[in-house]
Each structure stands twice: as structure tokens, then as C-alpha cells.
Amino acid sequence: MSSKMDMRSVSQREKKISLFKIKQYPKRLFFYILVPVVLLAVRVWLETAVWQTTRAHYVTLESVTAVLALFVGILALLRYSARPSNMILFLGTGFIGAGLLDIYHATIFSQTNLPLNAAQLGILWTWNASRIFLAIMLFGSWMVWQWETDNLFSPKSLIIWPGLIVAVGLMFFAAVQPPPDPASGFTLQWAELAASGLFFLLALIGYLLKKQWQEDWFEHWVIMSILIALTGQIHYLFYSTQLFDAMFTAATILKMLSYVCVLAGLLTGMLRIFRQAEDSAAKLIATNTALQREISERKKAEIAAFEQRQLAEALREVGNALSATLNFNQLLDLILDQIARVMPYGTANVMLVTGKGNEVIIASTRGYDTRLQNQLPPRFELAEMPTLLHMMKTGKPLIIPNTAEHPAWIQIETSRHVRSWAGTPIVLKNETVAFIALNNSQPNFYKLTDAVRLSAFAGQAAIAIQNARLYAELERKVEE
């Protein structure tokens, strides 16, 4: 029952997830349109702003951004180690490279002895370095996915490439310095700015055409990150006229916000991985439970079939043994000897119904010691024994697993040792002619299922008694 409930809860969760995906599709499209529009509106408002930040505040902001990029990159690589994907590998190394370049940028600009022109050229050059590097890696992550989809290469063949790209990118931006001429330097910065914007745009188009954003939370947040980064490059930094002005600071904040979006996607994706693992574990447990139940049921069926074969063989041998004698007194003793093969007992007796069917006599016993044997009443009224009356009325066996808990059980001196009892009537032509009673000192020794065994044996005993009676009647007629 618990396994069925687990399977049902898992399937219900999967249905909810599917419905949730369908509902999220138009909402995500709406956000992809809304985010650039809102950012453009904020840019228009900032065009009239005159406030500026300080060098110290800016360095602190860049340092925090660099640490955030490194954290996102490390988290992406951890996800790659748990569920390998070259797309995630490129993203992770891209953010680690961007974080290192941001640290380099913050370190260079923290030097207070730089002249204004040199500082402005240096900050634009190193600021754009992390953006163009990350834009290239984002576009590369989509290209890798496309190549894998088209089976153009083995997934394992690109493992070392992201690290090489990071190393080459760091050396390039550290070694190459902007031209000393301000006009040439700023021309190079705008070219670099346009290049980063182009790669962000190509990455955005690739991820949108990929269409996995419709279902995958991680890809949704990657697109949000690219949208914010692209808007920051084109509509904010491009319109910055001097260091630390409102546009420049807003572009830096948007860079940090783009990192936060990927972080949100990674955390959401990892949460989904954990939930999928939980669902898989629940399915596995439910399947194992169902399999164990099926194995147990099969074993029970095999044991029951084996016991039935054993019972049939024993009854066949018992029938042959009972048919081997026609002496009535010997037959009664033989009945108690043979029933032990079908139903073990501690003590047992055969009781014959006499007179008008209201009295019984104990005709044969087994297992009693001398003291108890002498105490057994040779004859007693049937009305004194509710168990025998019940069997005479129903014509069926009676099982009392625990005599201490059964209301029909009457405790007498000779039956104090009896804790579990089984009895069956022997019926000939719809008339009860005898009873077989089996006693055991262990509570719950006999089970209700034992009634089938007793009933089968009683049928064999009835045939043997009928044959013995017919033989005795024939002998009497011959003597007459």
C-alpha cells in the first residue's frame, strides 16, 4: 500500500511539473520582453542624473562582482562534476575567467597614482575584458551544445579546451595594453564594447533557438543573464561619458545582476536535480517494495503448492494404510497414528458417538501419561462439550488456536495441559459417528488454515470406518 502511495505521489508531482511548464511558457516570453524595456526606461531616466560614485566605492563594487563570478563558476563546475555537460563546463570556466579578469581589473584600478586619461583607458580596457571573454564563452557553450546535438565530435574531446581558453584570455588581456593615444585608445574600447555586445547577441539568439528555456529553469535564467548583460553593454556603458558617472556605475551593477541570474539558475537547477533524485529514489523504493512483495507472494504460493503436494501424498499413504485393516478397534488406533503425519499433536483421542447421539465414549488415545489416562472419563454427555456440539451441528472441523481466549473452551482437570486444540467430526451419510481431537501445549500451535487438513483426513477416516463397519456386519451375517 505504501509503495502504491509513493508511486502515486511521484506521478502527481510529475503532472504538476508538466502543467507548471505549460503555464510558465508565456510568462517567460513576457519577461524576456519586459526586462529590456524596463532597463531602457531606467537608462532614459539616468540620462538626466548627475551623481557620480568614488574610486573606492567602485573598486569595492568590482571586487564583490569578481567574487560573485568566481562563486558562480565554481558552482557550475560542481554541477558539471555531478552531471557532466560541456555546456555547463564552458559556462563554469567562462565565469571563472571573468571573475579573474574582474579581480585583475579591480587591482589595476585601485592604484591611485594613475593619471585620469590613463585610468580611464585602463578601466575601459580591463572592464570590457571580462565582458567580451564571458560573451565568447557563453556563445561557445551554445556552439558546443549544437555540435554535440549534430554529433560532430565526442563530448570528452572538449574537456581541456575551456581551461586553455581561460589561460590564453588571461594572458592576452594582461599583456596587451591600450594605446597611449586617447583617441586611438577609446576607438579600441568601443570596438571591444561592440564585440562583446555582438557575442552576447549571438549567444542570446542561440539559446532562444535552443528552446530549452521553455522547460529548463537554468536555461531560462541564462537567457535573463544574457539579456541584462547585453542591455548593460549597449544601452548603458556605450552612453557613459566619464568614469564613475551614473551610466558607468549602472552598467557595473547590471554586470553583477547578470551574474546573480546565472547563480539563481544554478541553484534552481541543482534543486531540481535533488528533487529528481528524490523522485527516482521513491520510484526505486516503490519498485523494490513491489518486487519484494511479488517475490514473497510467489514464495508463499510455491510453499503452499509444495505443502499441498505433501498433503496429497500423505493422504494417499494414509488412505492406503487405513484401508489395510478392517478391524474396527485396530482402525481407531491406526487413525491416531496416521493423523500425526498430517497434523502433529501432543495428545489425541478418538471419540465415538453412541446411544441416540447424545453420548460419546473415548475409544482410543495417544500421548497421555498413566495418571491422565486414568483420569479420562470413559463416557460423557455430548451436551457437556460445546466444542463437540458445534462440530456436530456444522459438520466441519473446529480450530481453537488459544484455548485461554476461546469462550467455548471448558477447562477440566485432564485438559489443563491443552493450550491449542483442533478437532474434526467423522461423518457418514450426514451422520456424525465419531470425533478426532488433537491437543498441544503450545498456544497458537494450530491455525485456522489447518481445518483443510483435518477435513481431508476426516474424509479418509470416514471411508475406512465405513469399510470396517461393513466388514463387521458381513461377518455377523455369516455367523448367523
Image (cartoon, rainbow, N blue to C red):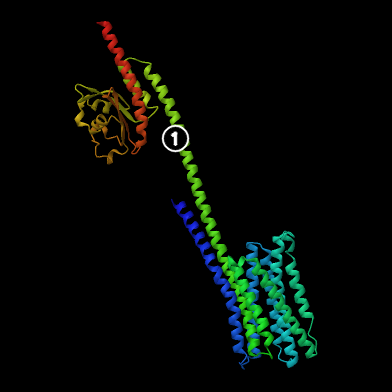
Q: From the viewer's perspective, tell me whether residue 348 is left or right of residue 212.
A: left
Judging depth in this view, the residue of 119 and 143 nearest the camera is 143
Q: Is residue 443 above or below residue 211?
A: above
Neighbor class of circle 1 (other Cα within 10 Å; few <14, some 14-19, many 20+) is few
Q: Secondary structure at mark 1?
A: helix
Q: From the viewer's perspective, tell me whether residue 302 is left or right of residue 428.
A: right
Residue 347 percent across, percent down from the top left: 32, 29
Residue 101 percent across, percent down from the top left: 71, 78
Q: Is residue 317 above or below residue 41?
A: above
Choose top left, top right, bottom left or bottom right for residue 24.
bottom right
- Can residue 435 be seen here? yes
* Label 1 sits on residue: 304
What count of labels does the image hold?
A: 1
Q: Is residue 341 above or below residue 38?
A: above
Choose top left, top right, bottom left or bottom right for residue 401.
top left
Q: Is residue 475 above or below residue 385?
A: above
Judging depth in this view, the residue of 100 and 37 nearest the camera is 37
Q: Residue at x 71, y 60 (%)?
A: 150
Q: Residue at x 74, y 81 (%)?
A: 192
Q: Residue at x 48, y 39 (%)?
A: 299
Residue 37 percent across, percent down from the top left: 59, 80
- Can residue 134 be seen here? no
Q: Amino acid at mark 1?
A: Ala
Q: From the viewer's perspective, tell me whether residue 171 is left or right of residue 87.
A: right
Judging depth in this view, the residue of 89 and 374 nearest the camera is 89
Residue 72 percent across, percent down from the top left: 63, 73
Q: From the viewer's perspective, tell me whether residue 268 is left or right of residue 121.
A: left
Quadrant location, the C terminus = top left
Choose top left, top right, bottom left or bottom right for residue 338.
top left
